Image: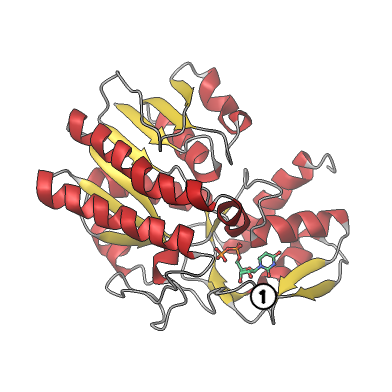
Amino acid sequence: MNVAVTGGAGFVGSHLVDALVARGDSVVVFDDLSTGSTENLTGALATGRCELRVQDVSQGIDCEVPVHEVYHLASPASPPAYLARPLETLAVGSEGTRHALELAHRNGAKFLLASTSEVYGNPIEHPQRESYWGNVNPVGPRSVYDEAKRFAEALTTAYHRTHGLPVAIVRIFNTFGPRLAEGDGRVVSNFICQSLRGEPLTVYGTGEQTRSLCYVSDLVRGLQLACAESFGEPINLGNPNEMTVLEIATLILQCTGSSSEIIRQPLPQDDPTRRRPDIERARTILNWSPEVDVAAGIEMTVAYFAHQLGLR
Ligand code: UDP
């Protein structure tokens, strides 16, 4: 198949591109490299079956090759990254999504939207099922990401209902693994880099807030299954293994053998208190569930960062 991937030079996108190339597809990547990097695509580009087009998909998507699947991942995704680019984040969620949907519609292709657990905001229902409408502050700092993704879900659903476009909407919960950008501020990359450098681990707030961490290879398998299935309604993809931020810090200290101390920093505004996916729909519809144990995933991620930082 020919496949288009927006945001294919990013953390999740580049792992997806690797998987698509490995299954024999030809992939065109659209990425403005604002948070992704060409380095992430080194392996895929070397196969000759991946082409990178440096483009901001909010402005349009120039794709003359016919495509069978469109994966729309383009967006800043870590809180510091989208908070630094509020207008760009809203633009890529709205105009970028419209351009990606048009590309799929023109080609009669399947369309996958990478949505997010952030559509649930600071959830009152726990764990979060797809039927939950969420608790989002529409004018808080995180709204630029949350509402962009909620709008993207609405637009994708409208294309599905209006044009019969086959669509998959996946709500991605916290994902980690190699190629997380070192300075992008997410909890796993921050704690691993801090541990490896012997710096204090910066726990925001009490550290009692929870997240559920999914290893990137599990997520990528879910993305491919979801696109093939094109279920039409949102599906959560994540690992239900819920941990407090303090537990994540402790696990990373163990895996790195670091004696870094833990220090407290202020909790960012509207930081969700707890988050855990209900993945019954993914199990039933996609026959998908995560296979990589969180500690094993952390080990692989530590090895990646140790290499990146020139430590091992
Ligand atoms: N966090 C933290 N220290 C850090 C980075 C993040 O305590 O150095 C916390 C953050 O406040 C949140 C959780 O870890 O409660 C996950 O944050 P992340 O930015 O990875 O993603 P989010 O799930 O908030 O989008």
The x and y percentages for residue 34 are 58, 38
Q: Residue at x 37, y 48 (%)?
A: 223
The x and y percentages for residue 48 are 48, 16
**Residue 255 appearing in the image:** yes
User: As drawn, is 191 to the left or to the right of 244?
Assistant: right
User: As drawn, is 211 to the left or to the right of 56?
Assistant: right
**Residue 171 appearing in the image:** no
What residue would you read off at disc 1? Answer: 267
Q: Residue at x 55, y 74 (%)?
A: 270
Q: Quadrant of the C terminus?
A: top right
- Residue 230, compared with residue 121, is above or below; it is above
Q: Quadrant of residue 27?
A: top left
User: As drawn, is 228 to the left or to the right of 244?
Assistant: left
Q: Residue at x 47, y 23 (%)?
A: 53
User: As drawn, is 308 to the left or to the right of 47?
Assistant: right
Q: Is mark 1 within 8 Å of ligand 1?
A: yes
The x and y percentages for residue 107 are 20, 28
The x and y percentages for residue 37 are 60, 33
Q: Quadrant of the N terminus?
A: top left
- Residue 42, compared with residue 162, is above or below; it is above
- The 10 Å Cα crowd at callout 1, few under 14, some 14 to 19, many 20 or more, is some
Residue closest to the eye, 5 or 175: 5
Q: Quadrant of residue 49?
A: top left
Q: Residue at x 56, y 29 (%)?
A: 41
